[in-house]
Amino acid sequence: MSFWDLIYQKKCLGCGRVGQYFCDQCLKTGEISDECFNNHLSLFCYRGLIREAIKQLKFRFLKDIEGELKQLIESGLRHKLTQPNTDLFREFLALKPVVQPLPLHWFRENRRGFNQAELIGQIISRQLRLKLIDRLERVKLTTPQSRLPREERLTNVKDIFQVKPGHLPKSILLIDDVWTTGSTMREAIKVLKEKGVREIWGLSLAR
Ligand SMILES: [Zn+2]
């Protein structure tokens, strides 16, 4: 244990117990999501430990969380890929899609210091051995979807993405942290389809 471990004690993001970011107890109650529909799937349900972890990640980058996040994502993916309702997703993965995390607007990313969707995308691309790309750009700074009433969310994200110039692959796996109404993901799908991408799936850490 280094001095820094003593200074910054790791605490469970769910219950505050010292030692790990995801303690065994909270992990047991963390719910794996069984949903898979319309070219989208989520690994976990957005409650409890997962909800807290995502919220915390938005406010501060926990430099050493990556190791534990990797394990969490790996167990979520492993579960998903053995579910009978994910056969279409497995067929899609066989196409060797590239991984594209949903970008943040540069202003928000600068302020926060990192993009959590990118961190999740990096981990997933390594685990599935897929290439990671950075071809989407967020051109509008919008109010976070979670702060808006449902009916305003659709117009809030309209035309927020632009595709950077250059050749695009035929199939893309989009990554986001939380799936709320899906309108952000749908906007990204729209601009990519316009540029000729044929197969697109969205994967979020939680819904
Ligand atoms: Zn805990």
Image: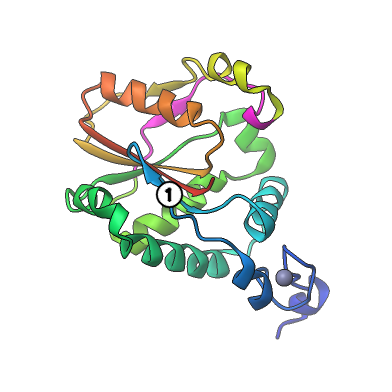
Residue found farthest to the bottom: 1
Residue designated by label 1: 35
Q: Quadrant of ligand 1?
A: bottom right
x and y percentages locating residue 161 in the rendered image: 45, 22
* Region in magenta: 133-146
Quick check: 141 left or right of 102? right
Q: Nearer the viewer, residue 201 or 109?
A: 201
Q: Residue at x 76, y 75 (%)?
A: 4
**Image height check: is 14 above or below 131?**
below
Marks counted in the figure total 1
Location of residue 48 by image quarter: bottom right
Q: Residue at x 49, y 15 (%)?
A: 158
Element class at badge 1? loop
Location of residue 180 by image quarter: top right
**Image height check: is 111 above or below 84?**
above
Quick check: 111 left or right of 78? right
Image quarter (top left, top right, bottom left or bottom right) of the N terminus:
bottom right
Q: How is the image coloured?
A: rainbow
**Image height check: is 139 above or below 122?**
above
Q: Is residue 20 covered in magenta?
A: no
Q: Nearer the viewer, residue 13 or 2?
A: 13
Q: Residue at x 43, y 54 (%)?
A: 122
Magenta region, mostly helix, strand or loop? loop
User: Is residue 164 something that shows in the picture?
Assistant: no
x and y percentages locating residue 113 in the rendered image: 64, 44
Image quarter (top left, top right, bottom left or bottom right) of the C terminus:
top right
